[in-house]
């Protein structure tokens, strides 16, 4: 929290102080969400004997986690977009309409070389390829996977697709390139589209791990529950379910249904369908009752908050200014000012600076690491010393 600041601030510090005030006004209000989540966890513990609940309740799964999901929850994952174009336009799609049509890259850069150079200064262990649908420009997908594999051969790699274009020859090429996992959005094509099911089966023969990743859409509950056994028969071993989101500026914003507002730690406002959790629990019950060979990962908003903290932690070493002290996701620095004289310095030098500038005023400043190398860290505290 910021402390009261009296007197006139130099222009540069005034901008920082105002940014802190803005971040405090946008602070998340997680109490209602947390209360509902705790009630959900209690129900899960009661109903699902073998459930795993870890990370302070932010990680919930039945069976196992794929290595990709583990990297994601550890905050050591990066999602690379090879294209934003798609052969479908799903009503629940959360891709922003405002994203440039030629966009490619990730939170770490625009090219494989720039991105992997930044990886070298972090702890990235997992790399996913997404879109749009990356199969829309399959030659670019092959090229980018090969370039990432050359530079980070140790990383676990996977990709997302609606599956319509993921035919056997394409999957064979992906297997040759060393892709570790493929994730199908079966909700995009009605859950049991015959072409997609054939491609899922082909993937299971060539790629080590086959996953279905979809939103838990309450209106599709029967379709989802009745598809589980079919997916298992075609080689799916992992299912990732997340809440249906009504993300502003996307197709999903126009969906109907009840909404629960969510404000993320950086002030972003979105909404989720509050009944998605009940459907995820129903899926776990079905898998348990029928002993299906399927692991279920509850990729909840709580889990996503954990992911965001992990991404900030990964990016933090890349974004620290020389005068800042870095700890986890936070940077701290101090500033001495008098009139127009403004001097930033490392907190360890505070005692020396007080002796050097006895007439100056001093403040401690705190920033939090951003979610992308293209963004500045956010000012979150301004404290007069």
Image (cartoon, rainbow, N blue to C red):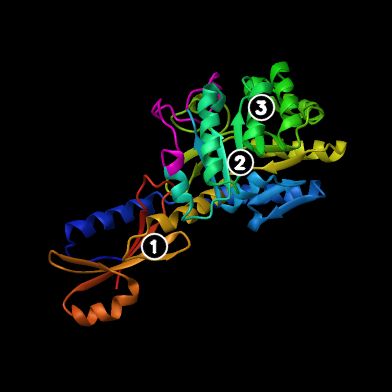
Q: CA distance from mark 3 to mark 2?
A: 14 Å
Residue sitting farthest toward the right: 290
Measured along the vertical axis of the image, is residue 331 above or below residue 154?
Answer: below
On the picture, is 344 further left or further right than 270?
left
Observer able to see residue 185: no
> What residue would you read off at disc 1?
331
Which residues are drawn in magenta?
A: 84-113
Mark 1 and mark 2: span between their CA atoms?
31 Å
Residue at point 62%, 23% (across, down): 188
Residue 178 part of the magenta segment: no
In the figure, is residue 278 to the left or right of 347? right
**In front of the other: 232 or 103:** 103
- Identify residue for label 2: 157
Whether tag 3 and tag 1 are in contact, CB under 8 A, the answer is: no
Q: Is residue 93 magenta?
A: yes
The answer to which of marks 1 and 2 sits earlier in the sequence is 2
Q: Secondary structure at mark 3?
A: helix
Dot 3 crowding, Cα within 10 Å, few <14, some 14–19, many 20+: many
Q: Nearer the viewer, residue 102 or 299?
A: 102
**Residue sitting nearer the eye, 185 or 53:** 185
Q: Residue furthest top?
A: 194
Mark 1 Cα-neighbour bin, 10 Å: few <14, some 14–19, many ≥20: many
């Amino acid at each position: 929290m910021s402390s009261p600041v009296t007197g006139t601030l130099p222009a540069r510090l005034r901008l920082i102080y105002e940014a802190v005030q803005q971040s405090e006004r946008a602070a998340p209000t997680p109490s209602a969400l947390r209360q509902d989540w705790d009630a959900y966890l209690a129900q899960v513990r009661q109903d699902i004997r073998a459930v795993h609940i870890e990370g302070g309740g932010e990680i919930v799964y039945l069976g196992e986690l794929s290595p990709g999901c583990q990297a994601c929850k550890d905050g050591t994952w990066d999602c690379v977009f090879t294209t934003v174009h798609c052969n479908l336009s799903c009503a629940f799609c959360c891709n922003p309409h405002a994203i440039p049509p030629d966009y490619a890259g990730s939170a770490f850069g625009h090219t494989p070389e720039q991105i992997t150079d930044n990886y070298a200064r972090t702890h990235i262990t997992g790399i996913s390829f997404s879109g749009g649908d990356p199969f829309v420009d399959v030659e670019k997908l092959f090229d980018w996977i090969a370039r990432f594999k050359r530079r980070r051969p140790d990383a676990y790699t996977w990709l997302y697709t609606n599956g319509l274009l993921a035919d056997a020859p394409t999957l064979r090429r992906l297997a040759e390139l060393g892709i570790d996992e493929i994730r199908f959005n079966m909700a995009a094509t009605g859950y049991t589209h015959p072409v997609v099911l054939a491609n899922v089966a082909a993937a299971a023969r060539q790629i080590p791990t086959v996953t279905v990743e979809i939103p838990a859409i309450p209106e599709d509950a029967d379709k989802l529950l009745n598809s589980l056994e079919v997916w298992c028969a075609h080689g799916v071993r992992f299912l990732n379910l997340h809440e249906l989101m009504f993300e502003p500026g996307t197709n999903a914003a126009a969906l109907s249904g009840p909404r629960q507002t969510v404000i993320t730690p950086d002030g972003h406002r979105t909404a989720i369908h509050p009944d998605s959790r009940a459907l995820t629990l129903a899926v776990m019950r079905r898998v348990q009752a029928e002993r299906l060979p399927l692991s279920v990962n509850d990729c909840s908003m709580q889990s996503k908050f954990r992911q965001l903290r992990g991404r900030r932690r990964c990016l933090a070493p890349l974004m620290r200014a020389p005068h800042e002290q870095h700890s986890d996701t936070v940077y701290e620095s101090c500033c001495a000012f008098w009139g127009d004289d403004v001097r930033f310095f490392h907190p360890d030098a505070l005692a020396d600076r007080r002796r050097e500038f006895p007439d100056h005023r001093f403040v401690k400043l705190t920033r939090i690491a951003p979610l992308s190398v293209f963004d500045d860290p956010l000012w979150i505290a301004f404290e007069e010393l």
